[in-house]
């Protein structure tokens, strides 16, 4: 299994593995699909030549065999192969998380009539979470940093990632819209880091009070910097930053725009034979974040049905119902929970969602331009 022998998670699964043995035919039959999906996702990320594809296919097959060997602890060769995938320019942790979720979905589909299904899901969900944590730790060690995130960059790391004159990629978020743009790292006369960027992006960064610098070679990390001072020179913003620190970049990446809502919409989850009223916090064409005042204890990777009230151009509300998969749960204090759900929308419903997201995005972009216009007026 993809766990170290000296871990509690390994010992726990070793005791519970007999409960998963009835799924051995399913596991063996799913291997080719898992490998092909992994390769397909990598093509989407970076493309692949035939030579690279053969290399990746061998690595993925060995990884799959080890993942579902419920007796043997993780061997060094499997970990090394996983890191080799990362060193070929792929962010494997994100892909692995997506593929393990797909495995659960197929399991639910194929064993929907099996009375032991929820027991299987519980065991696999716990195991996959432990695997992801372990692989994340390997990626962190591979960067030759033995510390947790939120740790300041060393001087040599500043020189590597934020060297004077280096072109970098930055991220800000405006009401749910991730804004990615290019900037240039500079050094001030006193040696501090200064980021040179377009005027409008400087306004966004100043409002957020921080910027995030990301680079595929940093994975699974990014660099967060606090904004100390901003100077605008015509169409350029010069932002002096402080406290560059490593953060986990996994949560920063989204394939699609997910817009925040000015006022939460009232939605509903149907799961486990019950209905839960929720607030819709943000959504995209493929995902939604729902908030409740009570932790309902829904299991990860559980299939749910979501009712979403989508505002239309004429001011009316159109309720649409979709199935989805609970990807992860975040907490806000002791009582509030946020359920992040991947939606399995058919083309028509996805079109309705995407149209609303596009209208909301356009509205927010107009806000950004308005902010820039007001700033010019003051100056």
Image (cartoon, grey):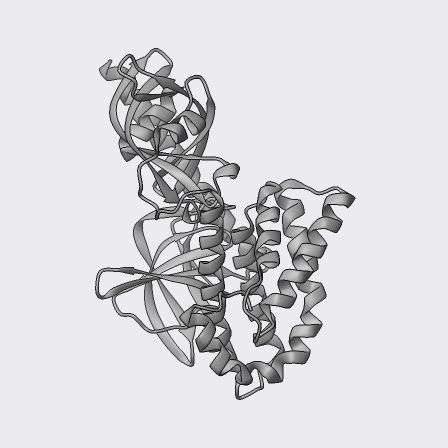
Residue 356 visible in rendering? no
Is residue 207 toward the left or the right of residue 34 in the image? left
Quarter occupied by the C terminus: top left
Q: Is residue 125 above or below residue 377?
A: below
Along the line of sight, the residue nearer the viewer: 251 or 62: 62
Pinpoint residue 221: horizontal percent, then vertical percent.
43, 43
Say which quarter of the image contains residue 175: top left
Image point 60% across, 58% down: which residue?
A: 78
Pinpoint residue 157: horizontal percent, then vertical percent.
40, 31
Quarter occupied by the N terminus: bottom right
Pinpoint residue 287: horizontal percent, then vertical percent.
47, 55
Along the line of sight, the residue nearer the viewer: 268 or 137: 137
Is residue 5 toward the left or the right of residue 189 in the image? right
Image point 61% across, 47% down: which residue?
A: 84
Q: How many marks?
A: 0
Is residue 97 toward the left or the right of residue 69 in the image? left
Pinpoint residue 267: horizontal percent, then vertical percent.
37, 63
| Residue at the extreme bottom | 115
Image point 40% across, 33% down: which residue?
A: 365
Image point 32% across, 69% down: which residue?
A: 277
């Amino acid at each position: 299994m993809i766990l170290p022998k000296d871990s509690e998670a390994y010992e726990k699964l070793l005791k519970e593995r007999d409960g998963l043995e009835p799924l051995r035919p399913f596991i063996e039959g799913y291997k080719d699909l898992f490998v092909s999906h992994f390769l397909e996702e990598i093509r989407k990320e970076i493309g692949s030549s035939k030579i690279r594809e053969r290399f990746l296919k061998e690595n993925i097959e060995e990884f799959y065999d080890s993942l579902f060997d419920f007796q043997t602890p993780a061997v060094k060769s499997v970990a090394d192969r996983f890191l080799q995938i990362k060193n070929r320019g792929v962010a494997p942790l994100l892909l692995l998380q997506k593929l393990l979720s797909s495995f659960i979905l197929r399991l639910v589909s194929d064993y929907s009539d099996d009375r032991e299904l929820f027991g299987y899901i519980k065991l696999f969900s716990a195991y996959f979470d432990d695997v992801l944590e372990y692989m994340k730790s390997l990626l962190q060690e591979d960067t030759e940093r033995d510390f947790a995130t939120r740790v300041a960059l060393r001087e040599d790391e500043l020189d590597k990632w934020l060297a004077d004159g280096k072109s970098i990629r930055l991220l800000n978020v405006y009401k749910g819209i991730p804004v990615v743009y290019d900037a240039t790292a500079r050094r001030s006369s006193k040696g501090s880091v200064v980021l040179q960027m377009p005027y409008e992006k400087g306004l966004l960064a100043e409002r957020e009070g921080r910027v995030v610098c990301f680079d595929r070679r940093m994975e699974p990390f990014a660099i967060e910097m606090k904004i100390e001072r901003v100077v605008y020179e015509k169409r350029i913003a010069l932002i002096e930053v402080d406290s560059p620190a490593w953060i986990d970049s996994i949560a920063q990446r989204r394939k699609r725009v997910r817009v925040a809502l000015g006022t939460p919409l009232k939605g509903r989850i149907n799961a486990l034979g019950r209905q839960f009223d929720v607030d819709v916090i943000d959504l995209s064409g493929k995902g939604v974040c729902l908030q409740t005042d009570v932790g309902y204890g829904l299991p990860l990777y559980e299939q749910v049905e979501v009712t979403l009230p989508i505002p239309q151009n004429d001011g009316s509300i159109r309720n649409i119902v979709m199935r989805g998969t609970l990807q992860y749960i975040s907490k806000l204090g002791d009582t509030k929970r946020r359920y992040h759900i991947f939606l399995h929308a058919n083309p028509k419903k996805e079109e309705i969602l995407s149209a609303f997201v596009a209208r909301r995005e356009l509205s927010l972009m107009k806000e950004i331009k308005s902010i820039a216009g007001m700033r010019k007026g003051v100056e």
